[in-house]
Image: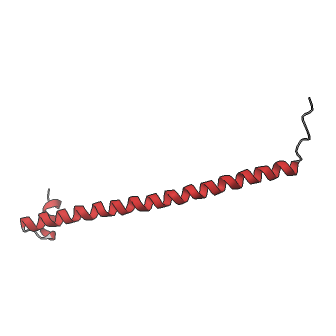
Amino acid sequence: MPRGKSKTLDEKISELNSSIQDLETKKQKLDDKIKALNKQKQSLLDAANQEKLQQLQMALAETGLSIDEALDKIKNL
C-alpha cells in the first residue's frame, strides 16, 4: 500500500515552528492568568493583614497601652 509523498524538511520545520508558536501562545496566556491570580491573592493577604492590624490596634486601645509600651513588653518576654 503506498504511503504517499513524505514531507520535505522545510515542511517539517514549518510544522514544528507552528507547534512551538501555539505552545508559546498558550504559555503566555497561562502566565497572564497566574499573574492575575497572584495579584488577587496579594490583595487578599493585604486585606487580612490590615484586619489583623486593626484588631491589634483595638486591643491596644482597650488596654490603654501605647505602641511603644506594647513593643517594650513584647521585647522583654
The image shows residue 22, relative to residue 49, as above or below, that is above
* Image position of 42 (left or right of 21): left
Quadrant position of the C terminus in the picture = bottom left
The spot of residue 22 in percent (x, y) is 68, 54
Q: Quadrant of residue 73?
A: bottom left
**Residue at 88% from the left image edge and 45% from the top image edge:** 7
**Residue at 20% from the left image edge and 66% from the top image edge:** 54
* Image position of 1 (left or right of 25): right
Quadrant position of the N terminus in the picture = top right
**Residue at 79% from the left image edge and 50% from the top image edge:** 15
**Residue at 23% from the left image edge and 61% from the top image edge:** 52
Residue 30 in view of the camera: yes
Residue 71 in view of the camera: no
The outermost residue toward the top is 1
Taking depth in this image into account, of 49 and 40 the one nearest to the observer is 40
The spot of residue 53 in percent (x, y) is 22, 64
Q: Quadrant of residue 66?
A: bottom left
The image shows residue 4, relative to residue 71, as above or below, that is above
Taking depth in this image into account, of 18 and 58 the one nearest to the observer is 18
- Number of marks in the rendered image: 0
Tell me which colouring the rendered structure shows.
Answer: secondary structure
Taking depth in this image into account, of 59 and 77 the one nearest to the observer is 59
The spot of residue 50 in percent (x, y) is 27, 65
